[in-house]
Image (spheres, grey):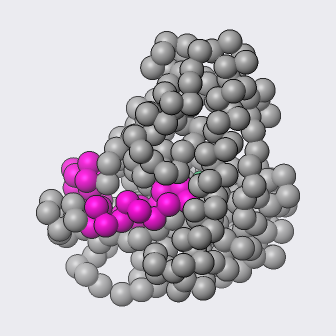
Amino acid sequence: MLGVTKNMLADLHIHTTFSDGIYTPAEIIKMAKKAKIRVLAVTDHDNTEAFPSALKAVEEFYPELRLIQGVEIDTFYGKYTVHVLGYYFDSTNPELQEKLAWTREGRKRRIATMVDKVRAHGYDITLEEVQKEAHGSTSIGRPHIARVMVNKGFFPTTQAVFDELIAKGRPCYCEQEKLTPKEAVDLIHKAGGIAVLAHPSEVGDTKVVNQLLDEVPFDGMEIWHPSATASDMTSSWLQLAKKRNLKTSGGSDFHGDPKRFPAVLGGFPIDYDNVAAIVEWKS
Ligand code: AMP
Ligand code: ZN
Ligand code: FE
Ligand code: FE
């Protein structure tokens, strides 16, 4: 059990500079130590490349930490965006890496189109600036656009950029081709991992969540997440997970944006016991 005991903190959902997080894997590991998090999963969007440098930082700065390889795969379920979290898969699995690379290519094209739309709305930003903000991340995303807009003084917060321009339904939003949730879950399973439905509150419709759980062989559901209300976490989603015999998971979805909850790693504490079934799936 690697020394993990009761009354400990865990976080199974965080982002680094390998997707749209602000901090490097090494910075995240140092923050996890400060926050006394004992189990951490790195779950970049459509990218598994942060893991080796995160592991190196664990060995160097925080060897007591149990670090889990993870990923958050972006999918479409009809018109609904569904995020699929994967854990404990073999990251060298060729099919998994091929599909993640395909999704990241779609991200690049989509962000280029969105930058054109933002420019057409009168904001002078360039694709080069957005790429620079992404610091070489191969998994570019809307937060990179939002940060450039804030840095150039067009908006006070990244949230304001989303609300005005780039959230779904806003004028500069753009879709891209994505896997289906079933394809993502199958990929994770074939690579030897387990799959968790991320932040069901963000799916936006309980009926759709139920339909998804009927159709897709998820192993677990992310109950504890900043997007869920207190009653969602302690009641609705938890009851649903129990009813369907799904493992419960939780994570802060920390990106490092001080204006987005949680502002610091550890700001959304999760008891290890709540995610033990996921963590202990593999010893
Ligand atoms: P993308 O991967 O380009 O679809 O962007 C998704 C990321 O943008 C999420 O992981 C969040 O970090 C952020 N995000 C999504 N929706 C919003 C929103 N309404 N307000 C602020 N940030 C958001
Ligand atoms: Zn993100
Ligand atoms: Fe997500
Ligand atoms: Fe996330």
Q: Nearer the viewer, residue 126 or 195?
A: 126
Spot occupied by residue 84 in the image (x, y as percentages of width and height): 62, 65
Q: Is residue 52 above or below residue 176?
A: below
Left or right of 43 in this view: 39: left
Q: Depth check: 212 or 86 in front?
A: 86
The C terminus is located in which quarter?
A: bottom left
- x%, y% of residue 169? 80, 34
- At a point 68% along the width and 23% down the height, the residue shown is 118
Which residue is depicted at the point 57% across and 43% down? Answer: 141
Q: Quadrant of residue 59?
A: bottom left
Which region of the structure is painted magenta? Answer: 26-55
The N terminus, quarter of image: bottom left
Give the quarter of the image for residue 109: top right
Residue 62 located left or right of residue 210: left
Q: Does residue 68 belong to the magenta stretch?
A: no
Q: Residue at x 29, y 71 (%)?
A: 66
For the residue pair 131 and 6, the one nearer the viewer reads as 131
The x and y percentages for residue 167 are 70, 34
Q: Can residue 250 be seen in this snapshot?
A: no
Q: Is residue 152 above or below residue 90?
A: above
